Image: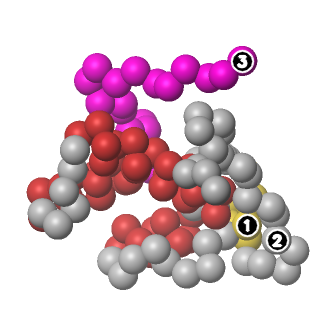
Amino acid sequence: MGCGRAGLPPEPVEEEIGKRRIFCVKFQREMTALDEPPFDNPLGQRIYENVSKEAWRLWLEHMKMIMNEYRLNLGTREAQEFILKQMEDYFFGEGAAFPPGYVPPKSKG
């Protein structure tokens, strides 16, 4: 049993027939929507209305990288606010920047 896909890109989410669809701000096309808001605040509602399941899944992978690179403790208010800012930038801004000095993992080719 492995721990993830070891440097491989995440598997895409299958488009689900009969599920709610939205115009995804990240992919700029109509896609399957999230089943519910990811959290209960205005940003969570905005994500629910504008972000596809696929884009949300990619954000979760990106967020893991941010948490590891910045060594964030999400038990602190500062870390939570930082992640929310990064999330808003990722979906509705110019995109979240990689941390200073971040080197992406080399792909196996």
Amino acid type shown at disc 1: Thr
Decide: is 94 above or below 84. above
- Viewed as shown, does residue 96 lie left or right of 75? right
Q: Splitting the image into 4 quarters, where does residue 53 fall?
A: bottom right
Q: Residues within 10 Å of mark 3 (few under 14, many from 20)?
A: few
Q: Residue at x 72, y 18 (%)?
A: 109
**In this picture, which residue range is highlighted in magenta?**
90-109
* Numbered badge on residue 32: 1
Q: Residue at x 41, y 72 (%)?
A: 44
In this view of the protein, can residue 92 be seen by the observer?
Answer: yes
Q: Residue at x 66, y 22 (%)?
A: 108
On the image, the x and y values in percent for residue 43 come to: 37, 68
* Numbered badge on residue 16: 2
* Numbered badge on residue 109: 3
> Disc 1 to disc 2, how far (Cα)?
6 Å
Decide: is 18 above or below 14. below
**Of callouts 3 and 2, the N-terminal one:** 2
Please identify the residue farthest to the right as the structure is shown. 17
- Viewed as shown, does residue 94 lie left or right of 18? left
Q: Which residue is drawn at 50% across and 49% down?
A: 61
Q: Quick check: marks 1 and 2 in contact, CB under 8 Å? A: yes
In this view of the protein, can residue 24 be seen by the observer?
Answer: no
**Of callouts 1 and 3, the N-terminal one:** 1
**Of callouts 1 and 2, the N-terminal one:** 2
- Viewed as shown, does residue 26 lie left or right of 41? right
> Disc 3 to disc 2, how far (Cα)?
31 Å
> Disc 1 to disc 3, how far (Cα)?
31 Å
* Numbered badge on residue 88: none
